[in-house]
Amino acid sequence: MAAKTVELTCHHYHSPEGDLFIYVPEAKFLMVIDSVTSGYAPFQGFDLSTNFHEYLKVFDEILAYKFDTFVGGHLTDIGTRQDVEITKELPWTCTTR
């Protein structure tokens, strides 16, 4: 069995504890749990996100990777690069209550 490279990086876009990016370059596979979920708009109030403007940067960080397969949530849907691009293009607004 041939060895594969798995890259693990921690960022701080969504969760105060950090967001783990799991990338397998050879397989063009990226997993970023809870930051973007394929086929769904983000949670109302953005769940654990404490800085909305910082959260919006996650899309460019994700799209900087070369991937075809994307796993982004606790749901069973497997996504693609296009799913992340679609979510990035949603009409984001931030209001203060």
Image: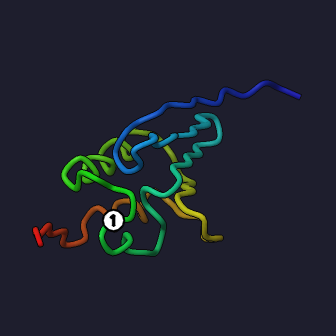
Which residue is more in the foreground, 85 or 32? 32
Q: Position of residue 47 (x, y in %)?
A: 38, 64
Q: In this view, which residue lies farthest toward the left?
A: 96
Q: Is residue 12 left or right of residue 33?
A: left
10 Å neighbourhood of mark 1: few (<14), some, or many (≥20)?
some
Q: Is residue 40 above or below residue 37?
A: below
Q: Type of residue at label 1?
A: Phe
Q: Is residue 1 left or right of residue 50?
A: right
Q: Position of residue 80 (x, y in %)?
A: 50, 60
The residue where tag 1 is placed is 46
Rendered image quadrant of residue 95: bottom left
Rendered image quadrant of residue 6: top right
Q: Position of residue 49 (x, y in %)?
A: 33, 55
Q: Is residue 54 left or right of residue 18?
A: left
Q: Is residue 36 above or below residue 76?
A: above
Q: Is residue 94 left or right of residue 6?
A: left
Q: In the image, what residue occupies the spot 46% across and 74% down?
A: 39
| SS at badge 1 | helix
Q: Position of residue 78 (x, y in %)?
A: 60, 65
**Quarter in which the N terminus is drawn:** top right
